[in-house]
Amino acid sequence: MLTIAKLGAWSVSYYVDTARQAAAAALDGRAAGGGLGEYYSESETRLPGWVSAGRDAAAARGLTGAGRDDENADLDAVTRWLDDGESPCGASGRAFGQRASVHGYDLTFCAPKSVSLMRGLGNDVTGKAVADAHAFAITEAMEYLAEHGGYTRVHNPRTGEKDLVRLPGIVAAGFQHETSRAGDPHLHTHVLVPNRQARADGRLVSLDGTSLYHEAKAAGIIYQATLRRELTRSIGVEWNDVDPHTGMADIAGVNRAELRSWSTRATQLREWAAGHLRLDGDDELSAGQLATAQKATRPRKPEGVAWASLRVAWAEDDRTFRVDMDAQQAARNARRAAGVDYAEVVRRAVSHGLTKAAFTRADLVEAIGARLPVDDADGPSPREVIERLADGVALRIGDERQAHQREGSIRYTAADLVAEERAVIEVMGRRHRGAVLPSVDTAGLSADQARAVTAIATSQRLVQPLSAPAGAGKTHSLRALRAAAHDAGKRVLVAAATGRAVDVAVREKAGDHGATLDAVLGRLERGTEVLDVDTVVVVDEAGMVGTQHLRRLLEVATSAGTKVVLVGDEHQLAPVAQRGGTFAQLVTDLPWAQRLSQVWRMHDHDERNVSLAVRDGGPAALRRAVGWYRRHERLHCGDQVTMADDAVAAWRADVVAGRDGLLIADRWEVADALNIRIHSERIGDDVPTVAAARGHRVAVGDVVITRQNTVDISTRTDRGADADPVRNGQRWEVLAVDPDVGRVAARRVDDGAIAVLSGDYLRQYTHLGYAVTVHAAQGVTADTCHALLSGEAATRSIAYVGLTRGRHTNTVRLYDTCAGEADHEHADPAAAGVHAARRGTPAQAATALRSVLGRDDRAATITTAAAAAEEDRLPDQVADLRRYHRTVTARLRREHRIDHHAAHDRSAQDRTHASDRALVEVLAAAHRYGTPLPSSGQRSDPVAVALSAPYVVTTLAADRYTPALADTVRQAAAGTNRRLVQIAAAPSRPDQRRLDQFAERLPAHPPSPGQVVVVEDAAAADPAHLAAMATALVLARGRLLLIDSGEPGPGRRLLDGLALPWSENTRPTPDVADPALAAVADSHRAVAARSWRILTTPLRSRDRRRERDRDYGLDID
């Protein structure tokens, strides 16, 4: 592998001093042996050699005065070049400024552990072969770096930009070291690149460090591929499978236990975890800790020891190293049988090696190099093969690279990925009439949850994205969707990237049954799972599902008429080792995509808002969010050990207080340290333990985590029934251990299920689980959360997850790593057992968090990456994809507008029909007898007449319903011992009750006799609620007074349609659309009119029609 680090002033001193010590030791050894040198005498001295690479490396050497690559470098010349910027020929560039200036770069090429052991413990032939292969591999990697990272930047006065100018070559000094900091075999070379390199005109200029860093991993993978090929060709070494992430492989037939025994690396964090290291200022160490405190001392690397002495010491070590020749032969046979198929190499690299559809060329080089088989035939080098394959498959997205742009700023894609993205676009707009779930009960949901669930359920669209921030109540919403599916006679299948997420969703009634997406796709391929129109598929945590899986699922599901609901958060973590960005693209592209906006998890309302700012807020919102976390003491920073110690202390306090505390880290290496530390604090030294994965020991009372899905382990509930299977990411409490057999009995934290973990599963997939990684914690909710994140490497999505797990508090501690602790690094010895604690200020912590939130590494789709480019400058396949995407999304937006307008029209019609039905019900009740209210008004006053009329329903204009009249009504009700209830659709006074709540209670709590109900904003009322109240008041012979403001609202149509003769009516009566309802309404209006005429017409005697002169002198009015 290749690591890169910046060198400051005087950083070269260590390398120069050790080289001189090694040279002196070698001379002493030869003198003691009569002047006889060893077989590989050049390696004996370990003096640095010149390393040059580039298109014109010879010119670069000539311009700087460096020697040939087969010459030793003068130590004083190397020192002057790195410290003072003066090349061996005496030339110098601009003087270095502050002490923090970058004087150079340390490119450290490390051989795999098995190769280092072959070098250190093998014979002279294998030792020389390893050294030669290592040196050649470095040369090849440096050639790649010089070609793609060997730039300087020059100001362009015409454009104002800094253009990148390629250097003729890179010249450096290589210091080959043989040991780790612990003194074990560890072959590595420090290639020290001065930050003053020769330009073509001879001037010494600075390297562009950004370009160098960007290409470093790719160069490291080229080093590994070249090393394997050279050793196979020279001494016939065969290899295990290559790690696709690092590009490294160990020699086949080497026992892993032996490799681990020769890897005695120690770090301050590990020593702290084991209890051998305390922070200064803490309480004194116990006697036991003092006895082992010396283990915490960081030794200097023994690079000053002569090579011959190192080999003697390793040969006498009790640890062994051997290579199984049968395994070597088996690997050789397999390699030769497989052959070399470069087309297949490219296919696997593109399909499985790229985590982004829009990638850099370096990403592609890494993916190809990690999958390149060893070809021991004569031919081009691995570097040349990888470069050629990369150029053959890469399709540039966007314009040609401009002079000011770095190579890493240009994005590429591949034809297979274009086809993959096109396939998703083809199916994302499919629809099916049978996908509609007509009945949706949204009771108990918030407004945005109800809107989202209703829209998803009632849509014919088969692909339904639901984007929701952390803590927005996704599961709560999905329960309502499941109920709607059941009402429609459908089943709900839950799929997710992790089995744990599936189990939680099913347990919380978000689905009927489920499986991981891998398992679901496997069943679909085998035919054991069938999707149809009567199935709804819910994909939970859809943002963590790769494009490959989403494509396959959507193609099968939409072809079968199955609705797929994709639930996730595009701002949380991306898929692991898969291409992401598709879920986010669907949320953006599909106009019917639903979004939840309210966060409910955190108890603090302000914390809910700042979590949304961390999720997707702009610069100003982020500054405010960071300020909030700082003011509330949720931010801390410092060195790794101190922050880990503080995090454990805070977590421990939560546990003691009875809170559910969650401890998370950004890497398993850090989580391991936290777990071991907590285990050592909780479990005694004399307690029986069992070996588990990652080198952990577990005992009764420990919390462990399982890391692999399996159905081979039986799980039972307390009552003996079968429980959910063992899943990756589940935490368990250890109930019993059997050290003799190597097994544990454990109870699952989530549901109390019991299982026995043993054998390979315990040793490989089970370890301590007090602390977990951020990826394992996504989807988890706790009372409090303590996140331990790297201030140098954490990203916005990682920080967002870490800051949103806790209900009560969320705290983040940002650490920087302890320098000089890698196997190939050097550091001064520390005081035994003591670590100097370093904590930053709140301002520094805030600055560190802002830096983290500025790193947004979310994957983008090809169409997103190509959006800003000129279409005529795109490759044909990319341009065609962009046109197709634009056409499809435009069509879907147009169709959605049409559907939306049609739905709005249908909704308006439905509302009109519902209002007319309510009108008929109110009219039916209006003319029924209601106990009149006594009125002191004149008979000529319409208001007095309306109040005193013996009818259930009366309408009054709002301007007539004065405070005085309201008081009159109140007194009249009180004077006749009748209950008065004042109601409003939107109450604004304490004495007003909510209309909807009152109406819903009527079936269980009917009105009291003669009750008077005043609705003070009847136009804003739901017509159905008004109808329910009018009907209920008929039986109570009560009164319903509807106060009409004349404003529009849900009750407007009903009020206008009443037209009661005992009320003032100034607005036209609307026509009832439904003829049947219109006829009923007219009949009720006729009855009301006839009743009113009878009531208001004076009674006359039977002689009323006689002549006045025959009325017997009676004046009858």
Image (cartoon, rainbow, N blue to C red):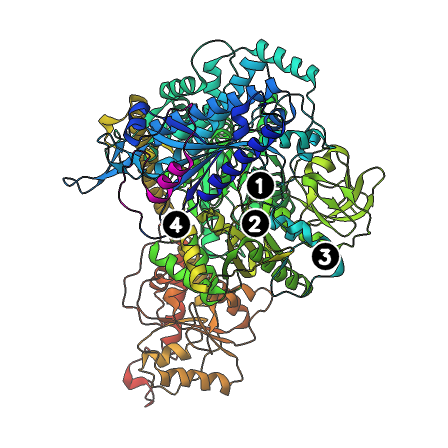
**Disc 2 from disc 3: Cα separation:** 26 Å
- As rendered, which of 791 and 322 lies closer to the eye? 322
Tell me which numbered mark, 4 or 3, is placed earlier along the sequence.
3
| Residue positioned most to the left | 158
339 vs 463: above or below: above
Mark number, residue 567: none
Kindly indicate whether the residue at mark 1 contacts the one at mark 4 (C-beta within 8 angstroms): no
Kindly indicate whether the residue at mark 4 contacts the one at mark 2 (C-beta within 8 angstroms): no
Badge 1 local density, few (<14 within 10 Å), some, or many (20+)?
many
Q: Residue sitting at 65 percent across and 26 percent down?
A: 121
- In the image, is 1055 to the left or to the right of 339? left
Tell me which numbered mark, 1 or 3, is placed earlier along the sequence.
3
**Residue that label 1 marks:** 301
Q: Report helix, strand or loop for mark 1.
A: loop
Mark number, residue 289: 3
Give yes or no for residue 72 being in the magenta stretch.
Answer: yes
Residue flagged by tag 2: what amino acid is it? Answer: Ala
Query: From the viewer's perspective, is the residue at label 2 or at label 3 nearer?
Result: 3
Mark number, residue 665: 2
Quarter holding the C terminus is bottom left
| Residue positioned most to the right | 740
**Residue that label 4 marks:** 854
Query: From the viewer's perspective, is the residue at label 1 or at label 2 nearer?
Result: 1
**Disc 4 from disc 3: Cα separation:** 42 Å
Location of residue 528 in the rendering, given as x and y in whole percent from the top left corner: 63, 25
**Disc 4 from disc 1: Cα separation:** 37 Å
Query: From the viewer's perspective, is the residue at label 4 or at label 3 nearer?
Result: 3
**Disc 1 from disc 2: Cα separation:** 30 Å
